[in-house]
Image: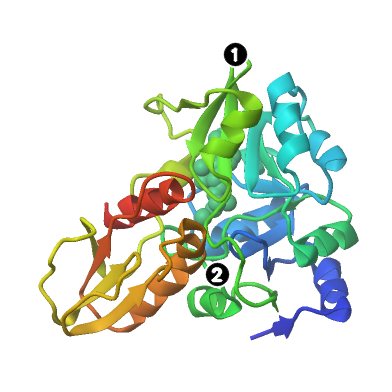
Amino acid sequence: MKLRRVSAVSIKTAAARLRAGGVVAFPTETVYGLGADGLNPRACARIFEIKGRPRFDPLILHECSAARARRLFSRVPAAAARLMKAFWPGPLTLVLPKAAAVPAIVTSGLKTVAVRVPAHPTALALIKAAGRPIAAPSANSFGRLSPTTAAHVRKQLGAGPDLILDGGKTRIGVESTIITFAGGRPVLLRPGGLPLEEIEKIAGPVGSAGKPKGRPPAPGCLKKHYAPAAKLRIVARGAKVKDGPRTACLAFSEKPKGKFAATAVLSPAGDLREAAANLFGALHRLENSGAKVIYAQRVPAHGLGRAIMDRLRRAAA
Ligand code: AMP
Ligand code: MG
C-alpha cells in the first residue's frame, strides 16, 4: 500500500494524483479525509465506492482559503460571513446554497453544499497544489469508526486510495461542526470539533435541526454511524460495570476497576479537548482487543463533550 510520510515531495505527488482524478487520504486537524477533485464527478464517485458510502450522503468540499471557499456558495448570510472570518481555517463546516460549478454528486442532488477550510498545513498545501476544491469525507468505511491516524485508514480502506499521506495523529480527533442557516439564523447539523459556545459568541443562538423531512439532510446525522465492530453501551460515569475477558471499558478520566479485555482513559486530567483527540484512537484499540461489548462512560455534555457524546450515541445505536 502506498503510505507516504508527509513531505514537500509526497504532497506534490498527491496533488498530481488528485488532478488526474485519483483518490488520496490525507490528514486534517479533525480526522483523516479521503480526498478527490471536488469538481470531477468521476473522481468523487470513487470516494463513494471506496467507502461503501450511499450516494444520498453528501460530501464536504475543502478549500485552502476563505476567499476561494466562498466562491463555492451562491449566497452567504451575514452571520455565515462572520463565522468564516472567525473560524476559518478551522473545524467548522458551513452548508449554504451551492454555486453552479459544484457537481450534483458532491451534494447528493441538494441545492446546498458543505464547505470548510481545514486548519492543517498538509491539507492546505495539498489543496493549494491541487488547485481545486477537494471533496473529502472521513477516510473510513461507511458507518465505521473515523480514522485519526494513517494506520486507521489503512486498516479500513486497504488498497482503496491511490495514496495515503501519513501526517501522524490528528490534533482535534472528531469531525467538524456542521452549521447551516435557516432564515438567516444558524442551525446545528452536527456537533463537532468547534464548540457550540464559540459559534454562539459570533453568530448568536444556534437552533437545532428538526426531524429530517423525507430524505436525510445530513447523514453524518444518520442514527447509526461511527460504530466499532463491538457493541457499545453508554453508562454513567460512576456506574459499576461487569468486567470480564469479553468486555472493554472506555473511561473519561479515571482508570476503571476490574479485569477487562482492554481499557482506555480519554483524559486523566478530565479535559474534554484531550478526550476528543483520543476518542477514536481509543475505540479502535478497544475494538482490536476482541471485546464483544465496550462500556463507554458519559462525558460532560458541554464544549467538545457534545461532539463526543454525539459520536458515542451513534456508535451505540
Ligand atoms: P463526513 O465528511 O464523512 O464527515 O460527512 C459529511 C457530512 O456533511 C454528511 O454526512 C452530512 O451530514 C453533511 N453534509 C454535507 N453536505 C450537506 C448538505 N448539503 N446539507 C446537509 N448536510 C450536509
Ligand atoms: Mg464520516
Residue at numbered disc 1: 183
Return the x and y of residue 310 as percentages of the image width and height.
38, 48
Q: How many marks?
A: 2
Residue at numbered disc 2: 148
Q: Residue at x 64, y 72 (%)?
A: 161
Above or below, 132 relative to 284: above
Report the residue that reaches farthest toward the top. Answer: 183
Name the quadrant of the N terminus. Answer: bottom right
Return the x and y of residue 223 as percentages of the image width and height.
34, 45
Mark 2 crowdedness (10 Å alpha carbons): few <14, some 14-19, many ≥20: many
> Which residue type does callout 2 highlight?
Thr
Residue 116, by quadrant, is top right
- Mark found first going from the N terminus, 1 or 2: 2
Return the x and y of residue 118 as percentages of the image width and height.
72, 53
Q: Residue at x 62, y 38 (%)?
A: 107
> Which residue type does callout 1 highlight?
Gly
Residue 285, by quadrant, is bottom left
Is disc 2 placed on a helix, strand or loop? loop
Q: Residue at x 29, y 55 (%)?
A: 298
